[in-house]
Amino acid sequence: MVKVERLSKSYHDKKVIDDVSLTIEKGTITSFIGPNGAGKSTLMSMITRLIAQDEGLIAIDGENIDKVKNNDLAKKISILKQSNSIQLKLTVRELVSFGRFPYSKGRLKKDDWEIVDQAIRYMELEEIQNKYLDELSGGQRQRAHIAMVIAQDTEYIMLDEPLNNLDMRHSVQIMKILRQLVDELDKTVVIVIHDINFASCYSDHIVALKDGKIVKQGQACDVIDSCVLKEIYEMDIDIKEVNNQRICVYF
Amino acid sequence: MAYKKKTVILFLVALLLTCLYIFYGLSGNIDYILPRRIVKVIAVIISGGAIAFATTIFMTITNNRILTPSVMGLDSLYLLVQTVMIYLFGSHSLVMMNSNINYVISIIAMVLFSLILYRILFRGEDSNVYFLLLIGLILGTFFNSATSFMQVLIDPNEFMIAQDKMFASINNVNTNLVYLSVVLIFLVMLYFWRYAKYLDVLALGKDLSINLGVPYNDVVKHLLVIVAIMISIATALTGPMTFLGLLVVNLAYEFLKTFRHKYIIMGSALISIIALIGGQLIVEKIFVFQTPISVIINFIGGIYFIYLLLKENRSW
């Protein structure tokens, strides 16, 4: 369980995260939604200690993240940011093998390589595993990065806009894989996502943010609601039930 | 595993050139010439290796291929520190007479500066490479100007003595400092050992490094201290060579085509040694000392630097 209490962060007197408290339950997919500049990515970066908070506490499984050793935390929680511009000459397989760093310190053993292969298979990257990253399309690169996070084998996985650059087929594929990670491997996944329909169809919990504050958090079906969405996005959004899924029509 | 083979080839070429430099045209008073040549070669090897090593680390922690410690003005700073010391203590004072003490004080000053540089480079929320480059060039020019200014103020006789003693160049290697440098390099390597494993991950960038459990700020700070010491050693032995690091590290990346720092560091150090000793052979035997090698290296390196800037610009 990730517990966030009264978190705040300002840049140059502007509060980007303002007194946010939330709990992320184990074994769920939680989506952070909200307009641009709502503070979703900042919140995620603070939970994974990429950015230091000004005020507030973050605890993972009851332990304050400021007090846990970096390497131990890297075995518990992983994050993938939206912009990953690696300039190195790396193959997909080499990138994925970096996911084992917290365990192997760069000297991978046989079982580390097995986990790497498993992650590559999971993301269907076998055919391109020996290609260099700069030869790949944006979607393939994104999948390679997700494979690295899977190889890191953490209980909590945080993904900042994982569907960026992906077409519909690969978006659905990735969301299904995330669902599998939660249902089969008992992971906890948190994503920042812009497409509220993906959020609605695949997540258990949704946290809606606006201007650094939480507008609403709860079960997906409670947050995907015309009134709530109007408050967040300032537009009228019609919600239709299709195959038992709530679909937002906002065109 | 092509890069392993290539590293071996580089090693053999470097070894060949070193032997050639030591034994070529060896005649006359061998007892006098041979030890002098060997000490000079050791100085050049240490210096070239240290520049390559420092530049590789610096490029990795700043995540770019253009910024080097020299471009950031670190070797100019070393000269400034030396000049300030003559200015304050005079060339006859204790500090100046014992060049080893002077050397150690300069290194301490460099380490302090590198910690300030760390604050500038890594405390900003997002740092732009071109902005840093600009700061570095301005700092470098400032250090150079301040150095010249102080040198003008110093009594000319005193300055002559000091210059002879302190300001090395590749033709005028400071052999007094070689033994202390060997010891220092050894100590720095021991210190570096703890952080070596993080280099490959650091090259992936700050966010991914933290994600993979690297104690980022701590590691970067210690690595910058190592960079500062290495640059001090190199500058003390053979004088400043602004573009050597840029040239050899980029060549190592192009030639070896790997991300593994173990090989990039070895490769760039070997290329650096090949460039310096090979270049020195050409300068001594073909140009008969008419052109200093640092001029040639800065000429080629400068052109390459402009090429890199233009290339980066295009991919924007």
Image (tube, rainbow, N blue to C red):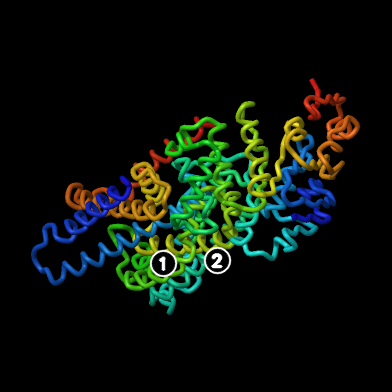
The answer to which of A95 and A87 lies nearer the viewer is A95
Report whether A41 appears left or right of A169: right
**Separation of disc 2 and disc 1 at Cα?**
19 Å
What amino acid is at disc 1? Met
- Residue B140 visible in this rendered orientation of the protein: no
- The answer to which of marks 2 and 1 sits earlier in the sequence is 2
Instruction: Please tell me which residue is depicted at 21% across the width and 64% down the height of the picture.
Output: B37
The chain under label 2 reads B
- Where is residue A53? Give x, y as percent: 75, 55
Vertical comparison of A30 with A75: above or below: above
How far across and how far down the image is residue A156, in percent?
67, 51
Q: Identify the image quadrant of the C terminus of chain B.
A: top right
Q: Which residue matches tag 2? A: B112
Give the residue drawn at x 44%, y 55%.
Answer: A110
Badge 1 element: helix
**Label 1: chain letter:** B
Spot occupied by residue A42 in the image (x, y as percentages of width and height): 73, 46
State the residue position of label 1. Answer: B189
Confirm whether circles 2 and 1 share one chain.
yes
For this orientation, the residue located farthest to the bottom is: B94
